[in-house]
Image (cartoon, rainbow, N blue to C red):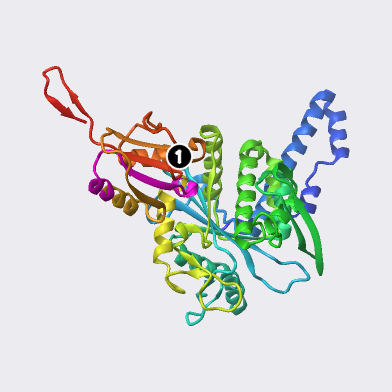
Amino acid sequence: MEFSINMTDSDLKKSHVSKKNLEGKFVKKKKPFLKILLSLILVIAIGGGLYFVYKGYVVGKEIGFNFSPSELIQKKKDPELKKDSTNTYTNVLLVGIDTRKNTKLLNTDVIIVGSYNHKTKDLTMFSIPRDFWARPVSDRTSFTKINAAYSINEGKKEGEGLPALELVVEEILGIEIQYHAMINFDGFTQLIDSVDGVYVNVENSFTDYQYPQGNGYQTISFKQGPQLMDGETALEYARSRKSQQNNEGSDYARAKRQQKVIDAFIDKLLSTETLLNPSKLMSLLTSVQNNLKISEFTLDDIVASVNILKNIKDENPTFSTYSFVLDPTIGNYSLITADIGIEGFAIGPKEGLGKYTKINEYVDLTLLYPALYSENPSVFVYDTGLGYKTSNTQTQELKTKFKYLNIRFQGTKYSDKEGVYIYSNEIDKFSKSVDILAKYIDTENKIKPEYITVNTAGDISILLGKEIIVEDVNNSDITE
């Protein structure tokens, strides 16, 4: 059973109590003026509340909200978002599309999957560049840039574009997607403005002399450092791809900047009272009303999402996201190539077009260890007493466990040292990786030992010394 509200803005205006009737009742019953004033305020408040609910319902219905009165009657203690078959992840496909009047194309130049781990509370984002060649679901015999998949399928049948793109992305990443949403440029800018802008830490200064504007170009510039961006500025930062400075003129750099803006938007939601402010929530809804397509969602989905954000805000104030882009550098340069036999700039899997076994494996590992693969350290292993052969064997085991990281065995450095050590010369940069690897190799020694007097190579060093022998009170040897 579907619930509908047949009410318009004019109907709500007509429902207001007339001043004339109130005055008549005042004379007849001789009520104190204060009571009449309070009653009037109450009526206005109730009317305003009904209007707010009505407008929220209308906006929600337009973007995919499916409401049933039974959801209010049925008491559920803890509503939950849909999860994948492992009951661990909720995956959302986020798509950005250019629908400007001077553009007839419907290319999806922003394709990002956000994956929330309900057990670890990690949020991981994967971007697929627009020039990644894939096979549209509706056409299994040929390949094209992934940013055309939506347009191809939507052109064949209205409403099929997003579900088809969702299937393509699921195949590439090897994950199950529970929700999808597509927003255009106007919706993006309005969304950012609805939360009074976002704070973004610009990693590199750059200037783009060919930023598209109308039928021509304009020049935009960004300086390194944190700054508050309004919607239009955030859009320029996320779309720019023609700069010749600091490697910011590629789709890969653009994808990373897009993730930074999304991360900043989440931070803004968590750092303000937006979640608890009805006017802010209505502003958010209104900003996307005509500029968003979304998979169907329910009241439970809304409550579960808000609860997750509130828990993050209350329990994990240092919450951060982990970002990955499917570019030729990922997986230690072993997954993506620009040499796929197609003229012009195009990228695809090194395994061959349509083959995603290794990419799927990499995505699985990043979801398990997002901090490790985000820091992406080079790990150099040294024999310092355990023995060359045993140390080499343990290094190979480490490489098998953590595929696609740069892990190398550096041979024997010492032959008489005891204990296992792991450390980084840049501890602030690779601290999470050190913790993860230390747990795997079962050591608590995470500081460089005194016998190492110079910096070792690699971002992280592992020293495999011989087992420590201690004597108990009965002089019997104990091996640790």
- Using the rendered view, name the quadrant where residue 228 is placed: top right
The quadrant the C terminus occupies is: top left
Q: Is residue 116 left or right of residue 201?
A: left
> Which residue corresponds to the image point at 60% horizontal and 54% vertical from the top-left?
256
**How many numbered circles does the render carry?**
1
Does the magenta run of residues contain 145?
Answer: no
| Residue 81 coordinates in the image, percent (x, y) | 48, 50
> Which is more toward the observer, 359 or 247?
247
> Which residue corresponds to the image point at 73% horizontal and 56% vertical from the top-left?
236
> Which is more toward the observer, 176 or 357?
357
- Using the rendered view, name the quadrant where residue 18 is placed: top right
Task: Report the residue that reaches farthest toward the top.
Answer: 473
SS of the residue under disc 1: helix
Task: Report the residue that reaches farthest toward the bottom.
Answer: 141
Does the magenta run of residues contain 382?
Answer: yes
> Which residue corresponds to the image point at 71% horizontal and 62% vertical from the top-left?
242
| Residue 164 coordinates in the image, percent (x, y) | 53, 70
Q: What residue did someone put label 1 on?
A: 432
Q: Is residue 250 left or right of residue 342?
A: right
> Which is more toward the observer, 419 or 230?
419
> Which residue corresponds to the image point at 63% horizontal and 53% vertical from the top-left?
257
The reply to whether residue 7 is visible in this rendering is no
* Amino acid tagged 1: Lys
- Where are the magenta residues, as a range? 372-393
| Residue 177 coordinates in the image, percent (x, y) | 48, 59
Relative height, residue 475 to residue 346 (above, below): above
> Which is more toward the observer, 130 or 183?
130
The reply to whether residue 324 is visible in this rendering is yes
| Residue 174 coordinates in the image, percent (x, y) | 43, 62
Mark 1 residue crowding within 10 angstroms, few (<14) / some (14–19) / many (20+): some
